[in-house]
Image (tube, grey):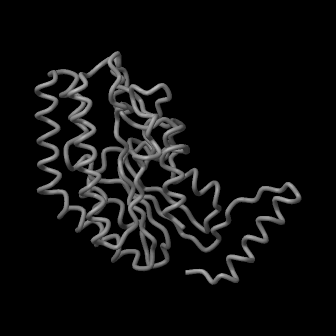
């Protein structure tokens, strides 16, 4: 908690800066930030992928990179990777943390529940198979995901005992109620959103048990889902299935970045 005196000085500094027309980044000189997680954290769909990231597809436009560019932390590293599950975070990403890490972000759990294959089922096999696949993912999420998240979050806390940890949600994919939205049926779209909300609920509860901050992006994505007039998500892309249902750069910066910024403090 900062003292009121410090807040007052910060407010005066901002006001003085604005008065002379200078814009300064929100400096985070003492922050050592590590981004963990899956494709929603690596920035799949946002373009400008780092060659060094290989199949992990870490984007310069991911919310973590955008936050680091705006806030100038002492250090920033992203080890988020496309397709990552909780086991991958434990095996390949936790090692990036240390006792000097002060800020961590993560999205994980969707792949554990099987959502990476659901859309293919929905597109190729129709409404009945789609609804059944989402229901199976919900059942898996409720039964298995809490324990996996508890283990993962516990490992994060052990590796970075002093860090502020921000757990981010997944956005709902569809804006419902559009009769002429091309693609899946309204029942399928409704069930997919329901499944995302179930998984987000499981993640929220696990974050609370760990004492982590839950950053919910569903509100910022409202009006920008598929079927909306201003979408921030890729629709099904048969020529590049990897980007399907992932945020554009606009979704990373307009949907994820403000939520993470507010949660990071």
The structure residue drawn at horizontal position 50% and vertical position 73%, both measured from the top left corner, is 102
Residue 248 placement, left or right of 214: right
**Where residue 162 appears, x then y in whole percent?**
44, 79
Q: x, y percentage for residue 264?
A: 51, 65
Q: Residue at x 16, y 29 (%)?
A: 130
* Quarter of the image where the C terminus is located: bottom right
**Residue 37: horizontal and vertical position, in percent?**
37, 54
Q: Nearer the viewer, residue 213 or 119?
A: 213
Task: Indicate left or right for 88 with 103 as reference.
Answer: left
Above or below, 1 relative to 35: below
Q: Please report the residue visible at 70 percent of the width from the left and 59 percent of the height from the top.
A: 25
Residue 99, picture quadrant: bottom left
Which residue is nearer to you in this view: 53 or 148? 148
Residue 205 locus on image (x, y percent): 26, 63
Q: Residue lying furthest right in this view?
A: 20
- Which picture quadrant has residue 134? top left
Q: Residue at x 75, y 77 (%)?
A: 9
Side of 74 relative to 103 (left or right): right
In the rendered structure, the answer to whether residue 39 lies left or right of residue 183 reads right
For the N terminus, the image quarter is bottom right
């Amino acid at each position: 908690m900062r003292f009121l005196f410090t807040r007052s000085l910060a407010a005066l500094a901002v006001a003085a800066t604005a008065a002379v027309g200078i814009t300064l980044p929100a400096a985070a000189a003492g922050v050592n930030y590590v981004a963990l997680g899956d494709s929603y954290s690596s920035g799949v769909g946002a373009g400008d992928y780092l060659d060094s990231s290989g199949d992990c597809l870490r984007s310069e436009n991911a919310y973590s990179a955008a936050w680091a560019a705006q806030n100038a932390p002492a250090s920033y590293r992203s080890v988020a990777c496309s397709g990552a599950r909780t086991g991958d975070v434990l095996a390949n990403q936790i090692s990036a943390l240390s006792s000097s890490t002060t800020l961590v972000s993560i999205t994980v759990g969707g792949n554990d529940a099987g959502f990476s294959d659901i859309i293919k089922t929905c597109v190729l096999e129709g409404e009945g198979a789609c609804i059944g696949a989402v229901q199976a993912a919900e059942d898996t999420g409720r039964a298995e995901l809490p324990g996996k998240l508890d283990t993962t979050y516990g490992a994060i806390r052990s590796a970075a005992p002093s860090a502020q940890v921000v757990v981010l949600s997944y956005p709902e994919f569809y804006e419902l109620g559009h009769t002429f939205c091309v693609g899946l049926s309204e029942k399928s779209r409704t069930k997919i959103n329901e499944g995302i909300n179930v998984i987000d609920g499981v993640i929220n509860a696990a974050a609370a048990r760990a004492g982590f901050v839950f950053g919910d992006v569903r509100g910022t994505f409202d009006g920008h889902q598929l079927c909306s007039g201003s979408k921030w998500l890729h629709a099904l892309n048969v020529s590049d299935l990897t980007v399907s249902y992932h945020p554009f750069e606009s979704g990373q910066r307009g949907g994820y970045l403000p939520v993470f910024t507010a949660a990071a403090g």
